[in-house]
Amino acid sequence: MEIRKLNTLRALAALIVVLSHYSNVSMLWGELLGSAAGQLGVMLFFILSGFLMSHLYLEHAYDKARARQFLVARVARVMPLFVAVVLLSYALHKLGVKYIFYGVINVPSLISHLTLLSGRDVLWTIAPEVQFYLLFVPLWMLYTKRPAYLYALMALVFLILAAMHFPNPIWGHRGYILDTKILIALPYFFVGIVLGRLYTYRQKLAPWQSAWYLLALLLIFLLYPQVFEAVFSVQHGTWQDPMVLLVMGLAFFFLVFLVPDNNRLLANPVGDFLGKISYSWYFLHLPVLRLMGENVSQYPALALPIFMALSLLVAYLSYRLIEVPSRRAIRRKFA
């Protein structure tokens, strides 16, 4: 059964990233929506990903056929557009068209991206995403045998990462860079997994459901770096801050568990559409922003609706022409 609210949350995650980049380039509202606020959208993406994997697969016992189906479905969803964007970025750079797509500037950079060792700009998020798909398979096996062991393992890993202040080690050798960020992403996937299992018991919370829990959206806004600093006179630690993880997890819980399923703000055709094209929107809004050039900084308020319309159009075309056909082809061949 589809959880329509997740479509809108997926769209919201992309919107946070899109507006963050626009704010940084245009200086609109003094970069209020930027200044690394886009990281919150990525965190929401990772929680969503963990939630869906848990909700869709952990309720079934692990077997090789299901694991194959899972991996094929996830690779078909994520990799075709990613590979296309990486190859196009490299080709354009070699043709002398720079600063439009992403900084895949040489063969080591190309290989580092395609092997998911590292990523530039928004491309970095795909490495930890796909790496967690691979980690999820043994976690699924463990959950099938002993569910409590999975929770204990996740708690242990979280405590170790917290004791190490959520490290993000980076290594480089002859232009090849290892910077996957899987260690800082793991806690968000884990939160998603736990919430995905709790969703089985959501009906017990039905008496407490209310549209007022939409105010949880303000929790996310409160974490915007400029907003947080203005309110609390300190800066939070983003990926290295457990408080940010807690607040993002609570916001997700309130919105998915306690807002009624038929709430028009979270379950509507617009949210369904934007959620559907959110992956392409996430990947392709930056090239659109760069193509608009100085118009963005000279006329920030006027350029915003134009940028939004153009980036959504490009995202829709990418979804129809790249995502859907490639996903179907991969599933037909390997499912």
Image: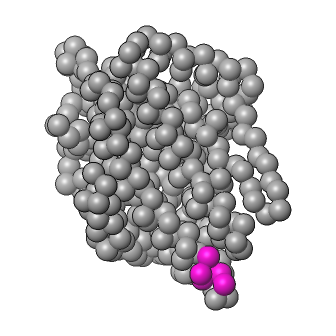
Q: Is residue 302 above or below residue 270?
A: below
124 vs 156: above or below: below
- Residue lying at the far front in this picture: please name it: 64
In the image, farthest residue toward the bottom: 95
The residue at the point 56 percent across, 33 percent down is 186
How is the model colour-coded?
Answer: one colour
- Residue 22 rendering spot, x and y as whole percentages: 55, 64
Q: Which residues are magenta?
A: 90-94
Quick one: 153 or 122, which is closer to the camera? Answer: 153
Picture quarter containing residue 266? top left
Q: Please tell me whether residue 280 belongs to the stretch shown in magenta.
A: no
Percent x, y of residue 240: 68, 33
- The answer to whether any part of residue 298 appears in the image is no
Expressed as whole percent of the image width and height from the top left, the position of residue 128 reads 56, 45
**Is residue 206 visible in the rendered structure shown here?**
yes
Relative to 194, say whether 333 is above or below.
Answer: below
230 left or right of 150? right
User: Of helix, strand and loop, which mostly describes the magenta segment?
Assistant: helix
Image side of residue 301 versus residue 228, left or right = left
Q: Residue at x 68, y 20 (%)?
A: 160
Residue closer to the observer: 25 or 62: 62
Quarter holding residue 99: bottom right
Please state, as top left, top right, bottom left or bottom right, where the N terminus lies in the image.
top left
Q: Give the residue displayed 40% in from the left and 39% down from the top.
A: 48
